[in-house]
Image: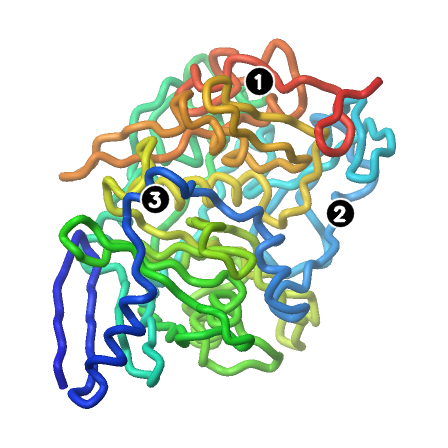
Amino acid sequence: MLSKVCTLGGLAILIAAGPAQVGTAQQSIQSRSLSASLLRSKMKPRTDHSNAALSKYGPQKAARFKAAGAPGITAHAASSGIPGIDSLVNWSDQFTYQGFDGNGNPQSVWPYTMVGNPPESGHTTTLHAPIVPVTVQLLGPDGSVALTFGPDGNVINSALESPEFEPFIYTNGVGQFNDQMMRAEFANRISNRGGEDDGWHTILRPRLRTARTIRVPFSTSSGANAWYYFINSAGQPVLGAIDDVTFGSLLFPATYPFDSSTPVGAAELAGDITTRDISTFLFNNTVLFSGGNINNCCIIGYHGYHFEPGIPQNGNLPRLYVLNYSSWLSPGIFLFGFEDITPWSHEMAETFNDPFVNNATPWWLSVDPFTGGGNCQNDLEVGDVVEALASLNPVSTIPGKGLTYHPQNMALFPWFAFESPSPANLGAYSFPDETTLMSLSPGPLLPGCVPAP
């Protein structure tokens, strides 16, 4: 067996081939290599739109529980959350704005559900946040391992010591990134108490769980390329790209009851993740391409939940495992400072604000004034607004233990509710950099962000 092993920025890479197949195997593998320069010129890092990603992987893996906010909720009179489900702690409320739904029908009341307890409660919610490291093995045409991408100890430790869990000083206080984001966007709804801490927090407690592995075949079921890899100027692999449908079928269990052949299924069966957690499946320099076309690269993360039917032990309530796929990114692969926790911070912040991916909003438009890139959506996805703003501070920097982290800046709730002026901390529409979003989206908008007549 001829093999080559190297380590590059937390990326374990193995290229192997049997002596008799060296020529053919290496040629087949090398045919999947692309220049990393494409990642900084023609390909853009982006997240997939939550459970829209999971819906590609079959009804069982994406079975979207049609959860709706509790009826009769009035603004600033929040409920304790969605009844009749087995999932994490959540609260529901609504806001008013004269907009249009996804079908172009007028709508003025917009229910939403978020993680934790309502701001007025003064209660602290503590959630376990399991991290499941996942190694990806890209297989050659003969089924042998061609390349391996996985988070090493340095990446895992950096994740555990990141602003997702470690406190940092923000303009509205000291704490974890998502807790302070929530306190910033609902600053007008928390008690002041003469400067003392009012007690409303949503805290994550990290738990490192058993590492898992997925093996990606050389080709998809239709015979298309299931994966590619990108190489730097020295010819070293720096990033793996996987067909998104293939990836989803390998990450999530296909049927119920399921076995431990996929990372999500194995983690659920082992009790490594539960319905009461926010679970992260942490990859390293592993992205996705959509539509079977590598030119539709690069998805760096998504969030949603894995649905399982109820069991007698939980009163037969539908089980919703809130989770995310996020790729840790080495520096320099993408432009605009997208590195280390940029994808993960995006998905975690969106999970806090839209855990069940059912928070519809008035249509909003976010456009970069210099590049022309933008997003047009009608959901409360706080990262997607800023993701498109390549020239307007999409990423912040936070110093850590031996590493400067790069969380993405997030849009705050008042931006989606079209509130002017913003009642958030410092009258802002974004966090932690309050200058990233200085104005609201145009509105009201019809589907496709067409101005209403």
Residue 281 in the figure: left or right of residue 412: left
Q: Tell which circle, 1 or 3, labels the residue nearer the N-terminal end.
A: 3
Is disc 1 in contact with disc 3, using a CB cutoff of under 8 Å?
A: no
Disc 1/disc 2 C-alpha distance (Å)? 25 Å
Question: For the point 64% across and 60% down, which residue is it?
Answer: 55
Residue placed under numbered mark 2 in the picture = 68
Residue 188 is marked as 1
Q: Quadrant of the N terminus?
A: bottom left
* Foreground of the two, 450 or 175: 450
Q: Quadrant of the C terminus?
A: top right
The answer to whether residue 15 is above or below residue 187 is: below
Residue 81 falls in which quadrant of the image?
Answer: top right
* Foreground of the two, 220 or 304: 220
Disc 1/disc 3 C-alpha distance (Å)? 42 Å
The answer to whether residue 268 is above or below residue 440 is: below
Mark 2 or 3, which is nearer the eye?
3
Residue placed under numbered mark 3 in the picture = 39
How many numbered marks, from 0 up? 3
Q: Amino acid at mark 2?
A: Ala
The answer to whether residue 250 is above or below residue 239 is: below
Question: For the point 47% across and 33% down, which residue is it?
Answer: 387
Residue 237 falls in which quadrant of the image?
Answer: bottom left
Q: Residue furthest top?
A: 421
Q: Tell which circle, 2 or 3, labels the residue nearer the N-terminal end.
A: 3
Q: In this view of the protein, can residue 60 be seen by the observer?
A: yes
Q: Amino acid at mark 1?
A: Asn
Question: For the point 50% across and 83% down, which residue is it?
Answer: 259
